[in-house]
Image: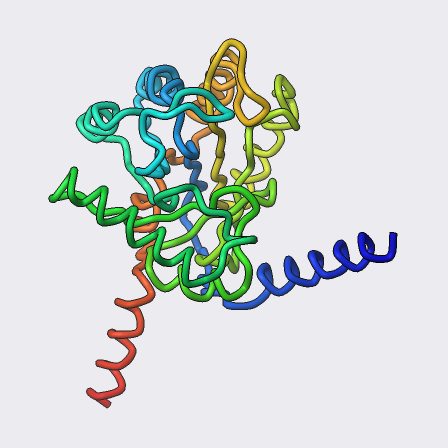
Amino acid sequence: MVNELQKRVRNKLHRFFADNFARRPFFMAAPRPYISFTFDDFPRSAFLNGSCLLSKYAVRGTFFVSMGLLNTESSSGRIATLNDLHNLLREGHEIGCHTFDHRDGWSTSPAAFERSVKKNRRAFNDAFPTEYLEVFAYPLNGPKLKVKRIIGKKFLCCRGGGQGFNRKLIDLNLLKAFFLDWRNQDNFALVRQLIDENNAAHGWLIFATHDISTEPSKYGCTPDFFESIVRYAAQSGACILPVAKICQELDIISYEKSTTSAREGTLML
C-alpha cells in the first residue's frame, strides 16, 4: 500500500514537471479558430474510413505513423500499409512522426526514445525521399521531462493528450489534444461544446483518435460519430487544417530555426 502510494505521488510529480517545464511557449494570437484531425499509429481503418470522411467535407488530416508497425496487428486493428501512406500523401493529407516502434516516452530512456524517433524518420525518408516528418505525437503516456526536452527540439511541434484545446500561451513541445475514444463515444454534445468554446477563444483544437470502425476498439470511434464531429466542425466556421499547415499559418518555426535566427540576430547587433 505504501509503495503504491509512493508510485502515484512520484508519477504525479513527473507529470507536473513534464507539463510545466521544457516548454516552448508561443502566444497564439490567431485571427480565427483552428481545428486539426489526427490519427495515432495509424490503423488501416483510419485511412479507409477516416480520410474518406475528411475528404467528404473537403478537409485533410494528420496521420502519425510508426514505420516499424506497418502492416501488423495492433489493439486498434490492422496497421496501415506503405501503399496507404502513398495514397494519403497523394490525397493531400499529412504524415507525422510517432517513433519507429511505438515507444512510450514515459517508460523509455531518453536515448532509446531519441533513437526510435531518428529511425522512424530514416525509414520514412527511405520510402518518401521528398517528404519530411515535421510534426510529432507522443505514443501512449506522453513524455518524461528529459524526453520532452530532447524531442521538442526536433519538430515544429509535439502533440500530447490532456483532453483540452490550445489557446493564448501554448506549449509547442506538448500541445493539448482531445481524444475521441471510449471516454466520450457518442457524446456529441460534449464535443460540440468543445468546438464552440474553441471557436469563441480563437484557439486550436486538435482531435485525436486511432481506428474508425463500426466496432471500434476502446481507442477509436465509429464512422457515424466521427462524421458528425467533422460535419459540425466544418459548419462552425473554424479553419480545419493538418497540424503542420496550421504551424505555417501561425508562423511557427522549428526550434533549430528559431535558435539559428536568434544567433544571427545577435551577431547582426
User: Furthest residue to the left?
Assistant: 130
Where is residue 247 drawn, in percent x and y?
33, 50
Q: Residue at x 12, y 44 (%)?
A: 129
- In the picture, measured across the screen, residue 183 lies left or right of residue 106, that is right
Residue shown at the point (59%, 38%) measured from the top left = 197
Query: For this view, does 27 lie left or right of residue 247?
Result: right
Q: Is residue 195 above or below residue 150?
A: above
Percent x, y of residue 80: 32, 25
Rendered location of residue 121, percent (x, y): 26, 48
Q: Nearer the viewer, residue 175 or 240?
A: 175
Considering depth in this image, is 144 or 7 the residue closer to the camera?
A: 7
| Residue 127 percent coordinates (x, y) | 16, 38
Looking at the rendered structure, the number of numbered marks drawn on it comes to 0
Q: Which residue is at 38% across, 48% downward?
A: 136
Query: Coloring scheme of the render?
Result: rainbow
In the drawing, does residue 120 fall left or right of residue 31? left
For the C terminus, the image quarter is bottom left
Q: Is residue 179 above or below residue 32?
A: above
Please indicate, yes or no, whether residue 38 appears anywhere in the rendered image.
Answer: no
Which one is nearer the viewer's eye here, 118 or 57? 118
Toward which corner of the image does residue 72 lie, by quadrant? top left
Is residue 233 visible in the rendered image? The answer is: yes
Residue at 57%, 46% in the rendered image: 141
